[in-house]
Image (cartoon, helix red, strand yellow):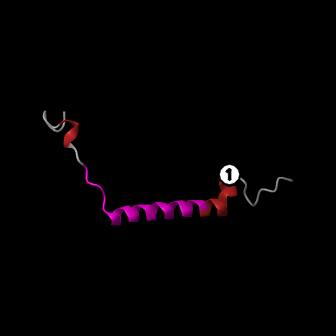
Amino acid sequence: MAGGPNMGSAGFHPHLPGKGYNFLAKSLGATMWFFIFYRARQDGSKLLGKHPWDHGDH
């Protein structure tokens, strides 16, 4: 397997990301969700199939 015969599962020690990367990832993720919820509030009915030109009485 990868890592050689004596490594085992104890040989893999990934480094944790720095505080700056952690903050940047959380900020970008929060911005993405705020934008998605904002667009859903603005255009949610169009996304679900209700269009302004559909009147339903014709």
Residue in the foreground of this view, choosing between 44 and 9: 9
What crowding class fits label 1: few (fewer than 14 Cα within 10 Å), some (14-19), or many (20 or more)?
few
46 relative position to 3: left or right: right
State the count of labels. Answer: 1
Residue in the foreground of this view, choosing between 35 and 55: 35
The magenta span reads: 14-37
Q: Residue at x 53, y 59 (%)?
A: 33
56 in relation to 31, above or below:
above
Residue furthest right as drawn = 57
Assign a secondary structure to mark 1.
Answer: loop
24 relative position to 36: left or right: left
Q: Residue at x 59, y 60 (%)?
A: 37
Q: Residue at x 16, y 38 (%)?
A: 7
Q: Position of residue 9 (x, y in %)?
A: 23, 37
Which residue is the site of mark 1?
Answer: 48
| On-image quarter of the N terminus | top left
Give the main secondary structure of the magenta stretch.
helix
36 relative position to 49: left or right: left
Q: Is residue 27 magenta?
A: yes
32 relative position to 58: left or right: left
Please identify the quarter of the rendering in which residue 46 is found: bottom right
Q: Residue at x 21, y 40 (%)?
A: 10
Kind of residue sitting beneath label 1: Leu
